[in-house]
Amino acid sequence: MPSDATPNPLSFLPLHPLEFRILMILMAGPSHGYAVVQEIEARERGVGKIYPANLYRRIRDLLARGLLEDADTPRSGEGDPRRRYFRITELGKAVVSFETRRLQDLLDEARARGLMTAKG
Amino acid sequence: MSNGPERWYRRLLGLLPQSLRRGFEDEMVHDFLRRLEAAESFPGKMSVWAGGFSDLVVQAVRERVGLWRVGRSRAGAPERAGFLGFFGRDLRYGARTLRRTPAFTLLAVLTLALGIGGATVCFSLVKGVLLRPLPFPADQELVVLRQLNPEGREESLSFPNFDDLRTESGTFSDIAALRFAATASILGGTEPVRGTVEPVSREFFSVLGVMPFLGRPILPEENRPGGDAVAVVSYEFWTRSLDSDDLLSELRITIDGTSFQVVGVMPPGFRVLEEADVLLPLEQNAFMVRSSSNYRGIGRLAEGATLTQAQAELNGIASRILAAYPEEAMLSGVSLRTLREVTFGSLTRPLLLLLGASGLLLLLACSNVASTLLARSIRREREMAIRTALGGGRRRLIQLVLGESLVLAFLSGMVGMGLTLATLKVLGSAGEGVIPRMGSVMVDGQVLGFSLGLTLLTALLFGVLPAIRLSEPAAGLRSGSGGSTRKTGRLGWNILVGGQVGLAVSLVVASGLLLRSMEQILTAETNFRSEGVLTIGLDFSTHESATLWDRRATFSELKEELGSLPGVADVGFVSYLPQSRTMMTGTVYRPPLPADGMPEHYVGNVGWRVVDEDYFRAMGIPLLKGRFFSAEDVPTASPVIILNEHLERALFPGADGVGSRVGFVPFWRDAELEVVGVVGSARDWRVPEGEQLEGYVFLGQKADYARVMTAVIHTDGDPADLFLPARERLRAVVPTVPGTLRTLDSILADSFRDRTFTLGVLGAFAVLSLLLSAVGIYGVVSYTVSSQAREIGILLALGAERGNVRAGMFFRSIRGVLVGIVLGVGMAVLFGGVLESLLYEVEPRDPMTFTVAPMALLVAASVAILVPVVRHTRIDPVQAMKVE
């Protein structure tokens, strides 16, 4: 029986795509919500816009599940003390790596079945 | 301190449950405001507001549903009690009430569903078509360039002009040129097909920032005279005609007799300005004549450059070009419009108009249901009085009635969503080719949120008035009070009826105006016959005819064969039909041509067509002066030309042009042509945008341009009957020439398709609004009359004439309608200007429309009033007095 103190990372899979994107971006370091959104939208065309309520509902859930935690404002010049910063937890990092593996396996299978001919 | 948008957004955040707002509210406000700042244009800001609002609605619902689920397992969750626990009872009550009156419920749901569905469809169209960026990176930097000729008219660029603009401009990072897509016969797949071919210059791919998704683009070294014959095909052409063959190295296509190596396939849906099946290297044979404008430019603004700066710079370059080549440049300036504007410009207005019309329709539906609810409410006055007597506060009563409205609204919302999906599916096929990117219109989270928000708003709109009315400390339990009509109630109904009629009048007037312009377009003098004409598109590029003489012989043989078919009166040939989109233009002038500078009389942008001696007869184009071409106009005789009416008037104002000599560059550089005749102006595809200047030259003298010709066959019978025999003759004479057979009728119908589409949608709106307002009036009058049953009974018992009673009631009810008609006409007059650009030869205040539409409403309203009036006064007076 898994104890509450150390949840099994596998129990969080599969991640919602937006949650996965948030976690991936925070792997690079603490950041605030708007910066995360900007990075997602800049990287991925066709995602559509991510509006605040949607974003912070995901962030709140990630916080509640212990994959994210609040962070201090970075000391570098770009930090804005008025914003709330978030940081990925060790558990969050483990979940990201498992989710990546899961998606990789899925892609491998698609390739093995010959579903990926034309290069994007 | 908070500004306007912040205050509003904070207020909207109230939609979210506390559990989500707590700790994030400031972040959400900050993010939203930043996004709002980033949107520069007004539509952009509106899009952010729409997105932000539907985001809140969708997330709020998800939260509630989530809490509700959680609430089931964990009893006593505070949120649940706050929202569903308290309200749930009212919702259940509402559902029960509605179940008891299925006919009313059905009618109300249908009415509202039509309103919600209509508005949602229009919103998803606007969002999918107008608010989505074009599929090019940084699409707002892309600008379409055209040149302004010395008269200030917009026309295509000539290649030398394009080249100079491109080299000298610093505000553009680069500019590409495109030819108009032309039809050609393409061999390569299983059978020869007609496809569109669009030559593009070497900058094309880099300017747009889109690369083939398979293979490579056309390389700069291929895009010059003598380069390899390579082609890039569209994804759609590749799947449709080339079987999605991804072994590109072995894929070749033959276009008009030349073989091309396919080197790339563009991504699905790639489209610039118009559909093209094949992109070819333009610069292998660019038309290097400065006075011949056949290209469009697409530029990408350099970083930091604005459209205004670019405009100023290009105008400067243009005047330098004009100074250097005064006689050929034909360039007084450059017109710049963003690619977005060019792509959607003609659609923005109709779509926004549709959105507005659908909003009006929704309002109409709401007021309709509100009036029916009001009428019903009288029967429940006693129930409400009892509830009040038992201690139900006013607030509770309002909530109770609103519960019913909410249930009604949600049912309607669901049906409306179904209607939306069905409509979008139908529009998807009917609107294809009319609305660019129709395929990308779909129902997503934002549209759902919009629809949900709309539903809530609807419930408030039609629910609040009846709710307040019902909860009024009313006549209470006094029995028999139900019959008296209170002054306030009467005024409320009059406002509702007047409002409904007003909305309906303005919708019907708007549709009527568009209907009238459609009629004008369809009945305008075309100067050619469309009935009884069969056309055969012929492509001689693959046909081996050694000399022009041979080709001429082929034409006469074809003419003889086709002319001997039963019922055929005339057979003619033309390079492009009046409705054809493929057209070449040149400049016609009156000699002499001075050594430096422009001739004194000249007209630019003249379309030209090559025709044979029988074309005008076959098409029924009238000869106004002079003569048609004849067999005497042999190649060795002096070349001849026939002008259309508009061209003659432009070139020889107030004088007779027949017998004069003119020059026509660049098509006829070596000689002057003699004007032998003037014909009526056959309307072409650009109409109604403007008059068309055209010159016709003789096939017998210009057979070298007769690569693609269309045979026009005029028959006494049904042209469709000729399909099979004509194809047989064709095969016998020229077996290798692909022929496309169509009746002229169907070609014309195609060219009007976008107009008929808009018209169909608006017509549907008009009929719906007429119907809805009639139903609404019926409901209200029906109630008013039935509530006066006792008074009627007394009047009749006292010996009043039945007819007089009826007339009195009728006139009392029609007053609201008349006020509404006046209001509606006023609105239509005020907003008629919005429609102006969509109208053709119809004034925005067209007296006929402004008479017929209100009359139609008046008739519909009269019927809606008379039916209940007559029904309720037919009763026996004694019976009527017993009614309570």
Image: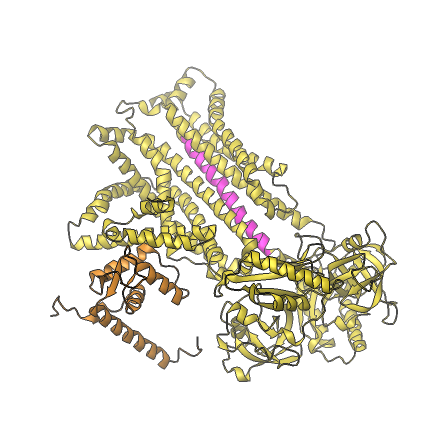
For the colour orange, the matching chain is A
Query: Is residue B442 shown left or right of residue B435?
Result: left
Of A119 and B874, the residue lying toward us: A119
Q: Is residue B780 magenta?
A: yes
The majority secondary structure of the magenta stretch comes to: helix
Residue drawn at (50%, 73%) of the image: B211
Q: Quick one: which residue is furthest to the bottom in this view?
A: B250
| Image coordinates for residue B192, horizontal then vertical, percent | 62, 76
> Relative to B881, is B375 above or below?
below
Check the rendered structure and report the hue given to chain B: yellow
Q: Which residues are magenta?
A: B753-782
Residue drawn at (49%, 23%) of the image: B807
Q: How many marks?
A: 0
Residue B328, picture quadrant: bottom right
Q: Is residue B14 magenta?
A: no
| Image coordinates for residue B640, horizontal then vertical, percent | 84, 64
Residue B878, picture quadrant: top left
Query: Is residue B89 shown left or right of residue B324?
Result: left
| Image coordinates for residue A71, horizontal then vertical, percent | 23, 62
Q: Quadrant of the C terminus of chain B?
A: top left
Residue drawn at (20%, 69%) of the image: A91
- Residue B435 in sight: no
Q: Quadrant of the N terminus of chain B?
A: top left
Query: Is residue B60 shown left or right of residue B424?
Result: left
Q: Quick one: which residue is furthest to the top in this view?
A: B798
Of B240 and B719, the residue lying toward us: B240
| Colouring of the image | by chain
- Residue B76 in sight: yes
| Image coordinates for residue B561, horizontal then vertical, percent | 77, 71
